[in-house]
């Protein structure tokens, strides 16, 4: 167009063009598995909004190839140690590994600890391994959304494995582990009453149990207790019975067996059409999360949520009527925009 060089319109257009080039570069370098680009891309999905959406849209067709594994369990169970060993084993087979560490209770220590340990084994300088701690800032549910997006990024970057370590088990962690193909639950000996908690909360999501710290007293007993609880669950030929694998992750014992159990689960899922089923459920969950996040943002930005709530409070309006009004406000604003943001 013929606008003078320094009008806001041309500045904005130039900015948008620069953005597009930046995004092209970012995607290209991400696909080349350049660590800096991967790091920047993950920061983008962490910040959420349109920046995250744009990036995921761009890489999505390149996803679906990586084997994704969630590792969850109580703090100190040995999740990081196990992830580290599984990564090292994969590297020995010549496979690449992307690792995400999600610990809402401690934004730094988890990743730092993991980083230190990997560094000790010399994996830190290995271009076949990428490690990242997910930041916890952002809205409720934002961490789970960002983690799912980050799994896509590592998948698109071409890592053979994406391992997600989460400290369990709150809803955020359940959401996170629901976004992987195989969920590994790490237990330790001497759980006692915790077996009940495992039974209640996490039994349903475990595909493989790892009984770590098998060098500790009471390992056999906990193994039997776990097996008992598992045998009580409904089970026939059409369901997967989660295996229990004993490991001493700190000494590298049982790692091959744990890796084999993970591989077996994945093969079973593929052979039974369960992988597609699970991924479809995951897609639905993601869409729902995005819709929730979007609706809230739109209600705040386009329908004046804050002001309306203030008015409603003074007038004694009930919450349903307020939500109705805001919902209509969002729909109205969307129509005026013609569906364009
Ligand atoms: N005795 C014993 N200690 C272990 C084992 N695996 C890990 N640890 C130690 O347990 C501590 C916690 O491990 P970490 O991997 O950080 O646990 P996370 O919090 O679940 O990630 C560390 O000091 C590890 O060295 C094991 O199999 N046996
Ligand atoms: Mg850890």
Image: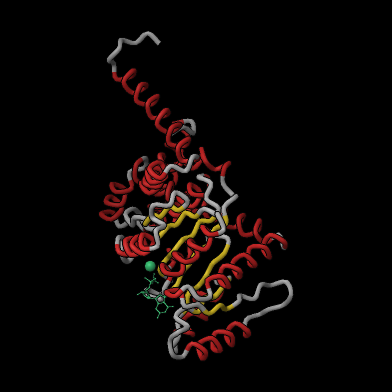
* Displayed quadrant of residue 23: top left
Query: Where's the C terminus, which quadrant?
Result: top left
Percent x, y of residue 271? 72, 61
Residue farthest along the right direction in this orientation: 237
Percent x, y of residue 117? 36, 64
Query: Where's the N terminus, which quadrant?
Result: top left
Judge whether 279 appears above or below 336 on screen: below
- Residue sitting nearer the eye, 141 or 246: 246
Percent x, y of residue 98? 47, 54
Which residue does the image show at 40% across and 31% down from the upper left?
A: 22
Percent x, y of residue 74? 41, 75
Judge whether 285 appears above or below 195 on screen: above
Which residue does the image show at 33% across and 62% down from the upper left?
A: 116
Which residue does the image show at 48% across and 49% down from the upper left?
A: 154
Q: Is residue 323 left or right of residue 94?
A: left
- Residue sitting nearer the eye, 277 or 129: 129
Can residue 90 be seen at all in this image of the molecule? yes
Judge whether 310 appears above or below 210 on screen: above
Judge whether 67 appears above or below 248 on screen: above
Residue farthest along the top direction in this orientation: 2
Which residue does the image show at 48% across and 74% down from the upper left?
A: 186
Q: Is residue 24 left or right of residue 242?
A: left
Q: Is residue 135 left or right of residue 295?
A: left
Can residue 298 be seen at all in this image of the molecule? no
**Quarter of image, ligand 1:** bottom left
Q: How many marks?
A: 0
- Residue sitting nearer the eye, 179 or 335: 179
């Amino acid at each position: 167009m013929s606008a003078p060089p320094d009008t806001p319109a041309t500045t904005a257009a130039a900015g948008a063009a620069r953005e597009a080039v930046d995004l092209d570069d970012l995607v290209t370098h991400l696909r080349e598995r350049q660590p800096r680009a991967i790091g920047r891309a993950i920061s983008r999905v962490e910040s959420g909004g349109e920046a995250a959406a744009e990036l995921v849209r761009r890489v999505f067709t390149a996803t679906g190839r990586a084997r994704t594994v969630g590792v969850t369990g109580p703090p100190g169970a040995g999740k990081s140690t196990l992830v580290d060993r599984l990564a090292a084993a994969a590297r020995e087979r010549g496979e690449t590994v992307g690792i995400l560490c999600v610990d809402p209770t401690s934004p730094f220590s988890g990743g730092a600890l993991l980083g230190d340990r990997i560094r000790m084994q010399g994996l830190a300088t290995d271009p076949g391994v990428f490690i990242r701690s997910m930041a916890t800032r952002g809205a409720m549910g934002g961490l789970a959304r960002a983690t799912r997006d980050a799994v896509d990024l590592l998948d698109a970057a071409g890592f053979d494995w994406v391992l997600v370590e989460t400290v369990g088990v709150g809803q955020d962690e359940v959401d996170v582990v629901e976004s992987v193909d195989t969920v590994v639950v790490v237990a330790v000996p001497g759980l006692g009453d915790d077996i009940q908690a495992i039974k209640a909360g996490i039994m349903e999501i475990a595909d493989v149990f790892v009984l770590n710290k098998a060098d500790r007293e009471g390992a056999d007993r906990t193994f039997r207790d776990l097996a008992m609880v598992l045998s009580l669950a409904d089970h026939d030929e059409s369901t997967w019975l989660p295996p229990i694998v004993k490991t001493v992750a700190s000494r590298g014992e049982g790692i091959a067996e744990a890796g084999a159990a993970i591989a077996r689960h994945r093969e079973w899922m593929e052979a039974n059409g369960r992988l597609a089923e699970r991924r479809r459920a995951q897609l639905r969950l993601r869409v729902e999360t995005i819709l929730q996040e979007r609706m809230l943002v739109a209600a705040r930005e386009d329908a004046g949520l804050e002001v309306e709530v203030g008015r409603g409070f003074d007038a004694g309006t009930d919450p349903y009527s307020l939500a109705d009004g805001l919902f209509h406000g969002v729909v109205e604003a969307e129509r005026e925009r013609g569906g364009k943001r």
